[in-house]
Amino acid sequence: MHLQESGEMYLETILILQQKTGAVRSIDVSEYMGYSKPSISRAMGLLRNGDYITVDPEGYIHLTESGREIAEKIFERHQLLSALLIKLGVDEKTATEDACKMEHVISDASFAAIKAHVGDLQL
């Protein structure tokens, strides 16, 4: 199943929230993203059906191996691209917004090249 940008954003959000609080429920995702509960519920159902997350009986969301791989990939891209844009002189708000768009469309090859190139820079 090919995951769309919105699915990647949900997975990244779950990862971020897990790192901050350790446990994530749909309401946490809703509050973090500013989306309605029904929208989050639908998205979580699609991610569950795609085997990207599991939800335990208490309602806590857990990333599957494939879900975690995608979330970590998107999060790494976001972090590096944001830092690079800021280093280039872009204001933080714009850099973060642009990185959020770029992280979903950049190819693995292009990101690897950027990552290798900026590896020596102090970001």
Image (tube, rainbow, N blue to C red):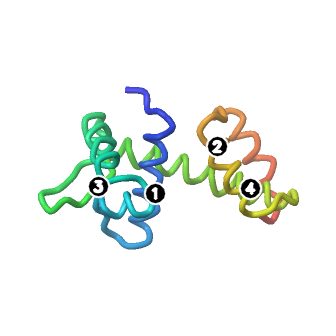
In three-dimensional space, the C-alpha distance between marks 2 and 4, rounded to whole angstroms, equals: 10 Å
Q: Earlier in the sequence, mark 4 or mark 1?
A: 1
Say which residue label 1 marks.
Answer: 33
> What's the residue type where badge 2 is placed?
Lys
In three-dimensional space, the C-alpha distance between marks 4 and 3, rounded to whole angstroms, equals: 29 Å
Relative to residue 99, is residue 47 depicted above or below? above
Residue at point 44% right, 72% down?
A: 20
Residue 41: x and y in percent read: 27, 47
Query: Considering the numbered disc 1 on the image, is that residue within a helix, a strand or a loop?
Result: helix
**Neighbour tally class for label 4: few under 14, some 14-19, many 20 plus, Cα within 10 Å:** many
In the picture provided, is 67 more to the left or to the right than 91? left
Query: Considering the numbered disc 4 on the image, is that residue within a helix, a strand or a loop?
Result: helix
In three-dimensional space, the C-alpha distance between marks 2 and 1, rounded to whole angstroms, equals: 15 Å
Say which residue label 2 marks.
Answer: 101
In three-dimensional space, the C-alpha distance between marks 4 and 1, rounded to whole angstroms, equals: 19 Å
Q: Nearer the viewer, mark 3 or mark 1?
A: 1
Say which residue label 3 marks.
Answer: 62
In the picture provided, is 28 more to the left or to the right than 13? left
In three-dimensional space, the C-alpha distance between marks 2 and 3, rounded to whole angstroms, equals: 25 Å
Residue 46: x and y in percent read: 30, 37
> What's the residue type where badge 4 is placed?
Ala
Query: Considering the numbered disc 3 on the image, is that residue within a helix, a strand or a loop?
Result: strand
Residue lying at the far top in this picture: please name it.
Answer: 1
Residue at point 30% right, 61% down?
A: 27
Relative to residue 22, is residue 14 depicted above or below? above
Q: Nearer the viewer, mark 4 or mark 1?
A: 1
Q: Earlier in the sequence, mark 4 or mark 3?
A: 3
Residue at point 69% right, 40% down?
A: 111
| Residue nearer the viewer, 108 or 8 | 8
> What's the residue type where badge 1 is placed?
Met
> What's the residue type where badge 3 is placed?
His
